[in-house]
Image (spheres, grey):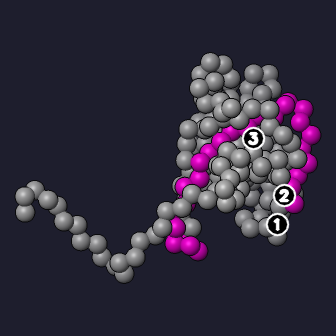
């Protein structure tokens, strides 16, 4: 067979689709040279009620991923971010309702230390948490990994963080 490998797949012959129509945004502030992450508690009657989350949003037709993430942060927190960063990470989840592998670009947005948070309608409370507390509260492993990564490469600021800054 001239060195060609042929794979035989079992099952119905259908494969999940791959989509990228959502974004993840991690909001943080710097207090005494340490990053604190904003976590939002979902309302009990909302999907994933009573869980702590970062900001998630959908990408509207014609909208860029970074614009969707910024819009979602403003909607969820009532605050305009001062700085935006690529977290250099894509979160992936399987959505069984669509039979789709969903790829979500991850962004980090900085707010001023004394930002006045005005919660969006899906949220009941919020908390500013340093890395260990944030990762303990978050449900999904991809969320915990994103917090650790953002804390390490962006959270402290400095020249390394500038590589991730978005205009």
Residue lying at 58% horizontally and 74% vertically, measured from the top left: 97
Whether residues under marks 2 and 1 lie with C-beta atoms below 8 angstroms apart, the answer is: no
From this viewpoint, which residue is outermost toward the front? 62
Q: Earlier in the sequence, mark 3 or mark 1?
A: 3
> Which residue corresponds to the image point at 56% horizontal and 73% vertical from the top-left?
98
The image position of residue 8, as x and y in percent, is 24, 71
Residue 39 inside the magenta-drawn segment: no
Quarter in which the C terminus is drawn: top right
Using the numbered discs, state the Cα–Cα distance from disc 2 to disc 3 in whole angstroms.
15 Å
Q: Is residue 16 visible?
A: yes
Label drawn at residue 123? 2
Residue at numbered disc 3: 27
Secondary structure category for the residue under label 2? strand
User: Along the horizontal axis of the image, is 75 left or right of 145?
Assistant: right
Dot 1: what SS? loop
Q: Secondary structure at mark 3?
A: strand
Q: Position of residue 44 (x, y in %)?
A: 82, 66
Depth check: give the residue in front, 166 or 156. 166
Between the C-alphas of marks 2 and 1, the distance is 9 Å
Residue 31 pos. (x, y %):
80, 26
On the image, numbered disc 1 is attached to which residue? Answer: 44
Label 1: few (<14), some (14–19) or many (≥20) C-alpha neighbours in 10 Å: few
> Quick one: quadrant of the N terminus?
bottom left
Q: What's drawn in magenta, residue-wise?
A: 96-121
């Amino acid at each position: 067979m001239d060195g060609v490998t042929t794979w035989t797949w079992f099952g119905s012959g259908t494969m999940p689709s791959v989509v990228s129509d959502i974004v993840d945004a991690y909001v943080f502030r710097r207090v005494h040279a340490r990053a604190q992450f904003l976590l939002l508690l979902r309302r009990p009657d909302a999907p994933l009620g009573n869980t702590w989350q970062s900001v998630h949003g959908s990408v509207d037709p014609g909208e860029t991923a970074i614009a969707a993430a910024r819009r979602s942060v403003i909607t969820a927190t009532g605050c305009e971010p001062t700085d935006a960063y690529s977290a250099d990470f894509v979160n992936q989840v399987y959505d069984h309702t669509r039979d789709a592998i969903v790829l979500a670009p991850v962004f980090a947005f900085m707010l001023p230390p004394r930002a006045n948070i005005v919660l969006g309608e899906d949220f009941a409370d919020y908390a500013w948490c340093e890395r260990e507390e944030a990762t303990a509260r978050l449900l999904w492993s991809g969320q915990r990994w994103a917090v650790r990564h953002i804390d390490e490469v962006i959270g402290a600021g400095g020249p390394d963080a500038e590589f991730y800054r978005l205009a």
